[in-house]
């Protein structure tokens, strides 16, 4: 029970399955890497902009969420790529 | 206090499909728990027109329910007597309308096109929001059956129609075709196609022209995959955390139910609305930029 709790995989598994799992994890992980930087940038810039000109907050918010969604979607392209690798190959 | 109650309620609701899955898992054939099996669509009412498969399945049922609810929202909140002393209902209706007009339509569409395209983007926003939202409410529309007092009832499950690619692709295809039609109608075919290509030296044309044409098709992919993958990933995360109970050890449940609840709240509060807004806003921007390419 302990070994399954710690996700210690047995070494006698299928190597192809392991490769697929790595592909899926890399797809999500590398996608999230870029998007994390991008989303941080967007919100950082938003804070700066509102701190400088608080009266523009309403106008900026629409653009902020647009940029957030466009950047966040990058993670999911990675996820879809990983899932394709997992399912098709 | 109410918020805490809401969180507890959400956790309990999340535990319900899990319990149902556990009871069905002890059936005749012990099948392995697989979150992806939620997305296999079984035909409920088979309708086949030649090569076309128009069968009614889970996603279609959710879409019909979503369409019905969108109509109800429009009728209840916006088709009411408007008084000078606004009621709660009227205020809510006006808020929805204002978001659709100020944040979505006026951001992307040129002034002359708002009258024609505001209804499209506004209904797109409300429809996608409703379909996303009912995707996070446990409804008895699952393919799994559970026996309660001798009657076989479908179990409660969460499933969003927008987490299937066909649905989002159909929505994106509509926007894509409207973009093209509006662009041609406002500018003429040749001028519209010419507007795809930016002002660059002629020597760069062999490089730029294929890229820009590809870019037009990439819009279709990015618009549909964004909504699809967002909803798919949200549901997959929640299902996987609940599924850890069956995959690893039952004693993991405080951890996995807590994490599933956190993601559930994140999805319901932020992702559902943002995705509906983004889809409508991008549709407005695409259509608007086709009507006034120089803008």
Image (cartoon, rainbow, N blue to C red):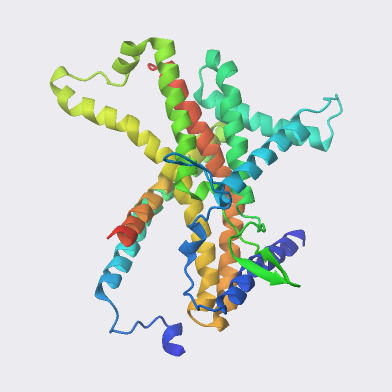
Q: In which quarter of the image is the N terminus of chain B?
A: bottom right
Q: Residue B150 at what x, y percent from top left?
A: 74, 72
- Is B282 located above or below residue B36 in the figure? above
- The answer to whether residue A61 is above or below residue A9 is above
Q: Is residue B194 rendered to the left or right of residue B295?
A: left
Residue B292 x, y percent position in the rendering: 43, 16
Nearest to the observer: residue B94 or residue B31: B31
Residue B183 in the image: state x and y as whole percent: 41, 17
Residue B273 image offset from top left, x and y in percent: 59, 44
In-image side of A62 versus B79 (left or right) = left
Residue at the image point whose x is 57% and y is 35% from the top: A57
Q: In this view, does A11 lie to the left or right of B85?
A: left
Q: Nearer the viewer, residue A24 or B61?
A: B61
Extreme residue in the bottom direction = A1
Looking at the picture, tell me which residue is in the foreground, B5 or A42.
B5
Q: In which quarter of the image is residue B194?
A: top left
- Determine if residue A55 is in view: no
């Amino acid at each position: 029970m302990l070994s399954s709790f710690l996700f210690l995989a047995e070494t006698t598994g299928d190597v192809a399955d392991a490769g697929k799992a790595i592909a899926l994890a890399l797809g999500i992980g590398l996608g999230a890497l870029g998007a994390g930087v991008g989303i941080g940038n967007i919100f950082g810039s938003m804070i700066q902009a509102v701190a400088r000109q608080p009266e523009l907050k309403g106008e900026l918010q629409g653009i902020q969420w647009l940029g957030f969604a466009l950047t966040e979607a990058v993670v999911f392209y990675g996820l879809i790529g990983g899932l394709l690798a997992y399912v098709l190959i | 206090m109410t918020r805490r109650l809401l969180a507890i309620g959400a956790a309990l609701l999340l535990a319900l499909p899990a319990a149902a899955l556990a009871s069905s898992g002890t059936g005749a054939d012990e099948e392995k728990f697989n979150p992806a099996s939620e997305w296999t669509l079984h035909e409920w009412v088979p309708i086949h027109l030649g090569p076309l498969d128009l069968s009614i399945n889970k996603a279609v049922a959710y879409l019909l329910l979503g369409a019905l609810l969108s109509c109800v929202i429009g009728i209840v909140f916006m088709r009411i007597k408007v008084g000078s002393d606004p009621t709660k209902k009227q205020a809510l209706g006006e808020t929805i309308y204002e978001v659709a007009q100020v944040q979505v339509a006026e951001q992307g569409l040129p002034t002359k096109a708002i009258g024609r395209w505001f209804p499209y983007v506004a209904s797109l926003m409300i429809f996608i929001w409703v379909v996303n939202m009912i995707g996070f409410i446990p409804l008895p529309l699952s393919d799994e059956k559970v026996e309660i007092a001798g009657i076989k009832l479908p179990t409660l499950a969460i499933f969003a129609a927008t987490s299937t690619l066909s649905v989002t692709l159909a929505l994106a295809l509509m926007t894509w075709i409207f973009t093209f039609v509006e662009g041609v109608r406002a500018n003429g075919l040749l001028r519209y196609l010419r507007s795809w290509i930016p002002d660059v030296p002629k020597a760069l044309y062999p490089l730029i022209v294929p890229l820009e044409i590809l870019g037009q098709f990439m819009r279709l992919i990015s618009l549909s995959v964004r909504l699809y993958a967002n909803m798919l990933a949200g549901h997959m995360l929640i299902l996987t955390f609940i599924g850890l109970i069956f995959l690893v050890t039952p004693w993991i449940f405080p951890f996995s139910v807590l994490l599933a609840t956190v993601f559930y709240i994140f999805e319901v509060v932020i992702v559902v609305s943002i995705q509906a807004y983004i889809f409508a806003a991008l549709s407005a921007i695409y259509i608007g930029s086709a009507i006034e390419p120089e803008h």
